[in-house]
Structures are given as structure tokens and as C-alpha cells.
Image: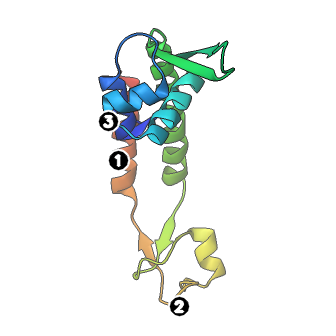
Amino acid sequence: MSLVGEDGLKMIGDMPEGEITDEEIATKTGVLLNTVRRTLFILYENKFAIVVRERDSNSGWLTYLWHLDFSGIEHQLMREKKKLLRNLKTRLEFEDNNVFYTCPQGCVRLLFDEATETEFLCPMCGEDLAYYDNSLFVGVLKKRVDALNNI
């Protein structure tokens, strides 16, 4: 879903077996041709689609025949998990090791050092900044990291 989106997922689910052109995929799946092409390109970049190029001997036109190959999906999922885990840990460390102040109007959220530079006034609207308790967010991040570590 994160790679191809909802329409791309629909296309994958409805795509016929065997080698097929992008136009045929669009017709048979009911997904817009541009979405089909974008999805196929993303799948190709991630090694989930294979394309064969054929040249018509009479017209010289190139035809691209596509088929899907999900044999490497476990490897890709592990790479995505590691990337997500790394990003979550980085964000957790940042949230855990900093103190934040926020504008009551919702304009900004500043680090303590940034708040002192503005004399605890919102740089956008001039309101007094208030301490922002991010412990709830830190808790959510920790649960997410733990869940990913247990997969």
C-alpha cells in the first residue's frame, strides 16, 4: 500500500496472469492508464515487475509486456521494516531528548533553545508560548518501536 497506493493495490489484485500490456491491464482492471503505468514503474523499480520489450517487425513499434513477480517480497518487507524502525528510533530519540514549547493558537512548536531566542513569544502571532508535554507522543512511538521489534 505504501508503495503503490489504493489504486495500485486494486490493479495488482485484478491483474491477469501472464505477460500483458499496460493498456490491457488498464482495460481489465478498470484502473486509469496513467495510474497503471506509474504503478508498474514503481513495481519495476522495486523488482516486483518484469518487463519484456518486443519490436513489431512491420511497424517498428515497441510493445512492453509486463508480468508481476513477488518472489522477493519478504526481502523488500524486511528492508521497509528496518527503514521504518530506524526512522521511528531517530524520532523517538529526538522527542525524548528535547523540551518543547508551543503556541496556544497552534502556529508553531519550538525547541527550548528556539523558544528562548523568541523570549517565549510565538514568532508568528506574538502569543505567549506554553510548555508542550510530548509524553503521550513518546509513548506512542515507543509502542510502535516495540511492535516492530517483535515482528
Percent across and percent down for residue 132 are 42, 69
Q: Position of residue 68 (x, y in %)?
A: 45, 16
Residue at image coords 45%, 34%: 36
How many marks can you see?
3
Image-based side of 44 in relation to 138, left or right: right
Q: Look at mark 1 in the image and give the residue it sits on.
A: 139
- Name the residue beneath numbered marker 2: 126
Disc 1 residue type (three-letter): Gly
- Dot 1 or dot 2: first in sequence order is 2
Q: Which amino acid does label 3 sit on?
A: Gly
Of mark 2 and mark 3, the one earlier in the sequence is: 3
92 vs 80: above or below? below
Measure how far apart labels 1 and 3 are at the Cα level. 42 Å
Q: Is residue 98 visible?
A: yes
Residue situated in front as seen by the camera: 137 or 98: 137
Q: Residue 30 carries which label?
A: 3
Question: Please, what secondary structure does the residue beneath circle 1 have?
Answer: helix
Which residue is located at x 57 percent, y 16 percent?
Answer: 51
